[in-house]
């Protein structure tokens, strides 16, 4: 069987990823889903922290207008700081994911 370049490239990539084991499977990409996961993670507040964003804002309560805030990243870092956590870099996948999650809380119009 003859393999074209695309198939050979995919096979090489698969072999390389297989060598990394579970690490690749655990890797997250920037997304609202990852942001939601982080929103509930006490680790954002630093070692020994037991609170998460969700502790004060269960299921995004009170954040339905956060999508309008042009300084949303700064607000997120203020909350992380209040939990004694380390501020996230604005261009990190964690910050971008948290922003995407909070933007996903934007109320939808009912169309009526």
Image (cartoon, rainbow, N blue to C red):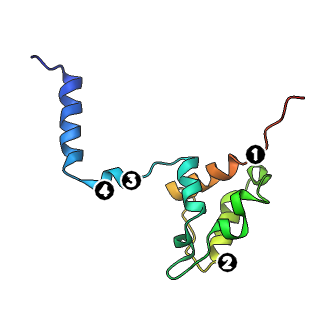
Q: What secondary structure is marked by label 4?
A: helix
Q: Marks 2/3: CA distance? A: 27 Å
Q: Is residue 12 above or below residue 57?
A: above
Q: Alpha carbon of mark 4 to alpha carbon of mark 2: how far?
A: 31 Å
CB within 8 Å, label 4 to label 2: no
- Circle 2 packing at 10 Å, graded few (<14), some (14-19), many (20+), is few
- Marks 4 and 2, the one that precedes in the sequence: 4
**Label 3's element?**
loop
Are circles 1 and 4 on residues that touch, CB within 8 Å? no
Q: Secondary structure at mark 2?
A: helix
The residue sitting at 72% across, 70% down in the picture is 56
Which residue is under mark 3? Answer: 27
Picture quarter with the C terminus: top right
Q: CA distance from mark 1 to mark 4?
A: 33 Å
Camera-near label (2 vs 1) is: 1
Judged left or right of residue 85, residue 65 is right
Few, some or many residues within 10 Å of mark 1 (<14, 14–19, 20+): some
Decide which of tag 1 and tag 4 comes sooner along the chain.
4
Location of mark 2 (residue): 82
Pointer 2 or 1: first along the chain:
2
As drawn, the residue found furthest toward the top would be 1
Residue beneath disc 1 = 106
Residue positioned 63% across, 78% down in the render: 83
Give the labeled residue for mark 4: 23
Is there CB contact under 8 Å for labels 2 and 3?
no
The image shows residue 100 at horizontal and vertical percentages of 62, 48
Q: Count the labels in the image.
A: 4
Q: Look at the image and tell me whether residue 92 can be seen.
A: no
- Mark 3 → mark 4, Cα distance in angstroms: 6 Å
Mark 1 vs 3, N-terminal side: 3
Q: Residue furthest bottom?
A: 48
């Amino acid at each position: 069987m003859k393999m074209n370049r695309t198939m050979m490239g995919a096979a090489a990539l698969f072999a390389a990823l297989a060598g990394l084991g579970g690490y690749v499977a655990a890797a997250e990409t920037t997304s609202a889903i990852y942001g939601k996961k982080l929103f509930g993670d006490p680790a954002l507040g630093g070692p020994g922290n037991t609170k998460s964003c969700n502790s004060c804002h269960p299921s995004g309560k009170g954040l339905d207008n956060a999508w309008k805030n042009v300084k949303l990243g700064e607000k997120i870092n203020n909350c992380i700081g209040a939990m004694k956590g380390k501020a996230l870099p604005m261009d990190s996948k964690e910050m971008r994911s948290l922003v995407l999650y909070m933007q996903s809380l934007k109320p939808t119009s009912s169309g009526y």
